[in-house]
Image: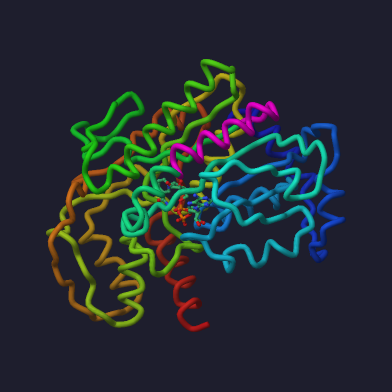
Amino acid sequence: MNIENKKILDQVSDSAKATTDRQDAPAVAKAMAGTAKSKKSKKILVTGGAGFLGSNLCRKLLELGHQVIAVDNLSTGRLDNIQDLTQNKNFSFIKHDIIYPINLEANLNIANLNIDWIFNFACPASPPAYQSDPIQTIKTSFLGMLNMLEIAKNNNARIMQASTSEVYGDPEEHPQKETYWGHVNPIGIRSCYDEGKRSAESLIFDYHRAYKTDIKVIRIFNTYGPGMDPLDGRVVSNFIIQALNNQPITMYGDGKQTRSFCYVDDLINGIIKMMQTDYGITGPVNLGNPKEFTLLELAQKVLNLTGCKSKIIFEQLPQDDPKRRRPDITLAKQLLDWNPEITLDVGLEKTIKYFDNLIKS
Ligand SMILES: NC(=O)c1ccc[n+]([C@@H]2O[C@H](COP(=O)([O-])OP(=O)(O)OC[C@H]3O[C@@H](n4cnc5c(N)ncnc54)[C@H](O)[C@@H]3O)[C@@H](O)[C@H]2O)c1
């Protein structure tokens, strides 16, 4: 960890005080209304805050002593993900679709909110989810980015865009460095997401060039862990749910395609480290686990860890499915002193426990 970042992290941790007070409007208003931009406690907007990554991020930011406003239209997110957070007086939730502008002050009944940081994480991330309404997906990426950038500009706030490894498409360069411009089919069924995210990157960099907006772009690679929606069709959740239900494991393609899987806690640490970097460190920065596995290896690990004896059945590979995916994280190591630490076996065990509890509840 670089010394500057460690100092900031330590200061913030010292000030962190978890609260179990019930959330009520006056308390939220009081907590949010301070005008001085304290270095320790920031006012943070998280879009997609009820989703898998967004809810884990909100939880971590609250632990660090910040005030968090989560905005989500609940299209793929779940209130269950943030149930525990609603007890915290530093947390508030607004149901809203970010393709439309939002007046946060009016929603929270607070004057001069002065947002410090924005994490723009709203967007369905699993292929079945983002392909179910592709026009809404591309609108969320582009119009959502535009609306959040306007808030950043008006509040002089720092803004992070959750971009994706999908901007590299079906890559011809392996592993993928941030300098690689990608190999994306602009008219295929994945393009609402891939090109949506690429256009959001264009826009955020244009705001940086035009208005000097303080921007951070991260390109997230496949991440898994507690908080995932059991039904959203991602490979890790699919395999685990099938194994826990003693159903056959569905493999699309021959299973020799590779992915690298990052455990959510590792990713959240990287996200926060990136957000704490100085103005001008814009990214894009890859965040993901560089250890590469075939999907057959993943399936075998899930079968071993769950003790399930199901067979693997093979189905046709969907259109434009990338064959290889592995981040080059040299930049993240240099810039953030960040390296994922949780092995796939350990991460899968925690994730299996989470899904097991979910199924039983
Ligand atoms: N999980 C990963 O492996 C991964 C990889 C790369 C990038 N990302 C990016 O990270 C972000 C979060 O992904 P996730 O895995 O948590 O997905 P998710 O589907 O669990 O979360 C997305 C959240 O955004 C909300 N949302 C969607 N459209 C919205 C809109 N128009 N207005 C308001 N809220 C909206 C959803 O309801 C959901 O709560 C996404 O931007 C995604 O593209 C995730």
Q: Quadrant of residue 326?
A: top left
Q: Is residue 47 above or below residue 173?
A: below
Q: Residue at x 54, y 16 (%)?
A: 210
Q: Nearer the viewer, residue 61 or 352?
A: 61
Q: Residue at x 20, y 61 (%)?
A: 296
Task: Tell me residue 355's x, y (percent).
Answer: 45, 72
Viewed as shown, does residue 299 lie left or right of 154? left
Viewed as shown, does residue 93 lie left or right of 328? right
Residue 301 within the magenta-colored segment of the rendering: no
Q: How is the image coloured?
A: rainbow
Q: Residue at x 65, y 36 (%)?
A: 117
Task: Tell me residue 174's x, y (percent).
Answer: 23, 34
Tell me how many marks there are.
0
Residue 154 within the magenta-colored segment of the rendering: yes
Q: Is residue 214 above or below residue 123?
A: above
Q: Nearer the viewer, residue 279 or 203?
A: 203
Q: Is residue 72 above or below residue 168?
A: below
**Quarter of the rendering occupied by the N terminus:** top right
Q: Quadrant of residue 312?
A: bottom left
Viewed as shown, does residue 10 lie left or right of 272? right
Q: Quadrant of residue 324?
A: top left
Task: Tell me residue 2's x, y (percent).
Answer: 59, 29
Q: Nearer the viewer, residue 126 or 257?
A: 126
Q: In this picture, which residue range is highlighted in magenta?
A: 140-158
Task: Tell me residue 113's x, y (percent).
Answer: 77, 39
Q: Main secondary structure of the magenta part?
A: helix
